[in-house]
Amino acid sequence: MARSQWGSRLGFILAATGSAIGLGAIWKFPYVAATNGGGAFLLIYFLICLSVGLALMLGEMALGRAAGNSAVGTFRDLRGGRWPLVGFVGVLVCFLIYSFYSVVGGWTIAYIGKSFGGEILTSDAKVLGNIFNGFITDPALPLVYHGLFAGLTLAVVIGGVQKGIENLSKFLMPALFVLMLVLIARALTLPGAVDGLLYFLTPDFSKVTGTMLVDAMGLAFFSLSLGMGIMITYGSYVDKEANLLSSSLWVIALTVLTCFLAGLMVLPAVFAFGFDPSAGPGLTFITMPAVFAQMVGGQLFAVLFFFLLLVAALTSSVSLLEVVVSFVIDEFKVGRKAAALGVSLLVFLLGIPASLSLGIWSEYTVFGLGFFDLLDFLTSKLLMPVGEVLLAIFVGWKVWPVIEAELSAGARVPAWLRAMRGFCRYVAPALIAGILVHNL
Ligand code: LEU
């Protein structure tokens, strides 16, 4: 069977951007930035994305295109030995992340319903907090929405690479940008918003700590979909003429821009309403309704916002499922439909304890973490960094000629490419390993 291909180069960039931009940028970034002191975090996050992030993204895309195989197969084709294990770590990370990602994806569907009902259209922090906590701690409802979200993701992945993923990204990602700009305009004109703006934009370097660096690095990789085989898999569907450097730069620029816009949308409003910036995972879900409550046609904006957030989450969850599915298809010679169904079912089951750990199972902890937080810790702080160190070593030391051939397209090796080799050989592994050690 011929390997699927993206319909166009723009389609590839949009799909990769669709994978990158999701709950990470819009849900995670504002609350992680807020708890890490704002401005300095923003700057460090940018720097990481543009350095280590760029090198790894280029590396992943080049590997995938060179091998034309899924995450595990790529390492096997290019080198063999124990290296396919790195691909396997990626597949595992996608599988684990997908289980709790789908739970949060379900929240966005529930909030579309709550916007229609109008119950969230208030600026009262207490009411909004109660609605959010009441919902996520409910033993049954979030599971229904988790199932719905996983079902939607499944439908797109069964539709296949080009039709399903590409079409979804092409129309709705631009719509999300426009809506965010409108919401920012409203948020910034709220009385008291300036304090939030200053908090977000003024770097206070006394806030830079080991924990902040770890958070920034974890979020950078999470939001750029790196270290889990996604860009390898997506790269394997790219034609040989596509310019991977400009594609990567586009993906990174758009993702970083979305994080920035999400911060502008959420943080000034947090300050304007006197909410607690360290509210954690509920921040976007609690703050944005308060903004809608202050808008003419707020209910419509609320529905639109949560719908587009759902789409952003879907284009990301699709990439998570796609990595696992293409691994199963390539390794076990199973059909796409059967593979997607089987994986979705497993993911749904794993998401159940994740969701319940926020409510009735909250007293069950491992290392002091509930199951939801444990999955997040295991993936973002442990497995992803391990995968990334190995990936950087693989790219810089083991298969560099292949990467160079992919990226220079036969022309003379440009200076940036030589810099990238040094970066992958020495800087990236040292940096990421340092962070890993700090985590442990
Ligand atoms: N990059 C995605 C996001 O920020 C997450 C990834 C795990 C698919 O939502």
Image: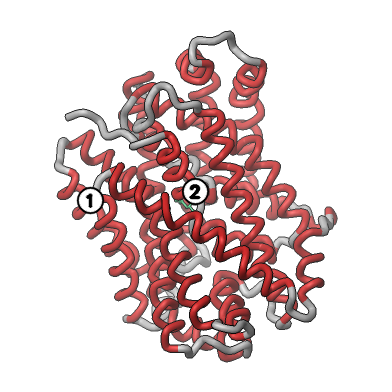
Mark 1 secondary-structure assignment: helix
Q: Is residue 31 left or right of residue 204?
A: left
Q: Is mark 2 within 8 Å of ligand 1?
A: yes
Name the kind of residue labelled 2 in the image.
Ala
Tell me where residue 328 appears, x and y as whole percent: 23, 41
> Where, by quadrant of the figure, is residue 307 drawn?
bottom left
Q: Residues within 10 Å of mark 1 (few under 14, many from 20)?
A: many
Q: What colouring does the structure picture have?
A: secondary structure
In percent of the image, x 54 and y 35: which residue is there? 248
- Relative image position of residue 11 (x, y in whole percent): 41, 41
- Cα distance in 3D space between marks 2 and 1: 20 Å
Vertical position of residue 198 compared to residue 77: above or below: below
Residue under pointer 1: 158
Residue at 22% across, 34% down:
331
Quick one: 257 or 178, which is closer to the camera? 178
Residue 261: image location, x then y, percent? 64, 59
Disc 1 residue type?
Ile
* Residue receiving disc 2: 20
Lateral position of residue 404 relative to residue 47, left or right: left
